[in-house]
Amino acid sequence: MLNDLDPLLHSQLRLGIMSLLISLESAEFIFLREKTNSTAGNLSVQLDKLSEAGYIKIEKSFKGKKPLTTCKITRKGIKAFEDYVNTLKQYIHK
C-alpha cells in the first residue's frame, strides 16, 4: 500500500519553497519570490502555512531601514520533505 502524499507539500509553490530551502541555510523573502516567480502576497500566505505547520521558521528584522524577512527550514520540515520525496519514489517504482 502506498503512503499518502503530504497535502501541505503537494502545492506547487509550497513544494518549490521547501525545495529551495532544503539546500540553503536560509533565504530572504525576495530571493524566494524571484526563484518561485510568485507574487509577494501569495508567497506570504504560503510561507505562513509552512510556518504554522512547523516546517519553516520565519525571522523578521531590518536591513538598514528596510524590513527583511528570512526563512529557514526546520528539522520537522526536512523530515516532511524527505518523507514526501520518498513517498513519490514509491509511486514511481510501483
Image (cartoon, helix red, strand yellow):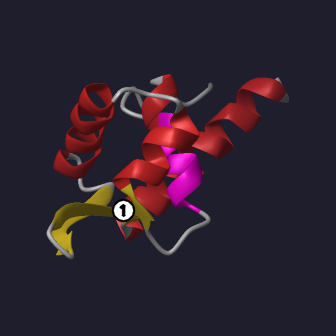
Residue at the image point whose x is 62% and y is 65% from the top? 23
Q: Is residue 7 above or below residue 60?
A: above
Q: Quadrant of the C terminus?
A: top right
Residue 88 occupies quadrant: top right
Q: Where is residue 20 shown, x and y percent of the image?
A: 57, 52
Q: Is residue 42 left or right of residue 61?
A: right
Q: Where is residue 70 shown, x and y percent of the image?
A: 31, 64
Q: Is residue 94 above or below residue 85?
A: above
Q: Main secondary structure of the magenta part?
A: helix
Residue at the image point whose x is 24% and y is 63% from the top? 68
Residue at the image point whose x is 51% and y is 41% from the top? 34
Q: Which residue is mark 1?
A: 76
| Residue 80 visible to the viewer | yes
Magenta-highlighted residues: 15-22
- Disc 1 on helix, strand or loop? helix
Considering every residue shown, the one lying at the far front of the view is 65
